[in-house]
Amino acid sequence: MSTSATSSEARVDAVRPSLAAHSLMDLVGRTPMIRLQRSGDGKVWVKREGRNPSGSFHDRVARYQLDATMQPVVVSGWSTHALAVLALAVSTGREVHHVVCQGEPPRLRALCSRFVARPERVRNAQELDAAIRSKVRTGCIHLEPDDPDASARAWRDVTMEVHSVRPVPPLHWVVSGCGVESETLRAALEPDLPESDRVHILPWDGGQERRLTGTAACRRQQSGHREGLLLSPLGAELIDHAVNVALQSSGDVCVVLPEDGHRYLGWW
């Protein structure tokens, strides 16, 4: 090996400890975990579940739901949760039905149609409920996004991933209930966390996903950008909440984004 190559490797090795201590990205459960440099006094770490190669937080929930039953399943509407269930069910050979109303974002409709090309279409919420009840009577299980057990188990996996790789765990967690009651989620998470950790749950507005609307210019204004990160509106809210927590308390803050701005740009 040449002297120049050896000295070059030595320089890289000398830099590694510094990068490890101040890195912008740590792989946590193969998910990028990014440290905000300018917000929250540098104490905020962002775990982006949408960049996990095995899927987003919604994919984790779908996996637990499908593991809990071998019966055919039905999902309704156009949502990140519906997309996750459809993708996993089709990839594992499970029987899955999709019931939808008209008028949803074309980008999301196109993604869901990759797995169920011809969903059952209805005109309104009343017909949607009737169609779901009809499927349930035939033996299907209706999988909903606000599943307390599956959501709590998915969040528990996320927090354990962070604790397993970070020598100094965060003292504060900022998450979204994704339709699950805050106290239900808190009761599921806190027993597995160190006593010093605190869980902050962003209120969920009736279980409705944030959606970008209007012209392309309007959608760009509604999308969130924090320190170069392209985020969904929910992701931006979560990061802002985490920054406030960091400024008002001591210790690191880990904010978990259930989806990713790049993955869902244009229809959330």
Image (tube, helix red, strand yellow):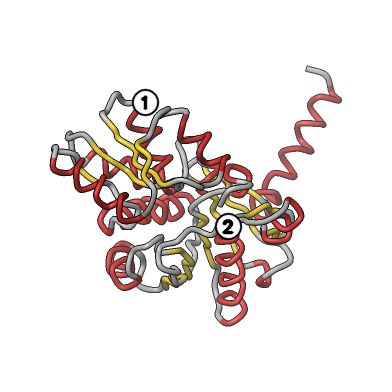
Task: From the viewer's perspective, tell me whether residue 251 is left or right of residue 163.
Answer: right
Residue drawn at x 45%, y 64% is 176
* Disc assigned to residue 91: 1
What separation in Å lies between label 2 and label 1 (alpha carbons)? Answer: 30 Å
Label 2 Cα neighbours within 10 Å, binned few <14 / some 14-19 / many ≥20: many
Q: Can you name the residue that lies furthest to the right here?
A: 4
Residue drawn at x 72%, y 58% is 218
- What's the amino acid at mark 2? Val
Task: From the viewer's perspective, tell me whether residue 191 is left or right of residue 82.
Answer: left
Camera-side mark, 2 or 1: 1
* Disc assigned to residue 46: 2
- What's the amino acid at mark 1? Ser
Do the CB atoms of the residues marked 2 and 1 lie less than 8 Å apart? no
Among numbered discs 2 and 1, the one appearing first in the sequence: 2
Residue 134: give x, y in percent of width and height. Answer: 19, 43
Residue drawn at x 50%, y 61% is 168
Q: Can you name the residue that lies furthest to the top here?
A: 1
Number of numbered discs present? 2
Q: Nearer the viewer, residue 36 or 5?
A: 36
Q: Nearer the viewer, residue 113 or 86?
A: 113
Label 1 Cα neighbours within 10 Å, binned few <14 / some 14-19 / many ≥20: few
Residue drawn at x 28%, y 68% is 184
Under tag 2, what secondary structure?
Answer: strand
Under tag 1, what secondary structure?
Answer: helix
Q: Quadrant of the N terminus?
A: top right
* Disc assigned to residue 33: none
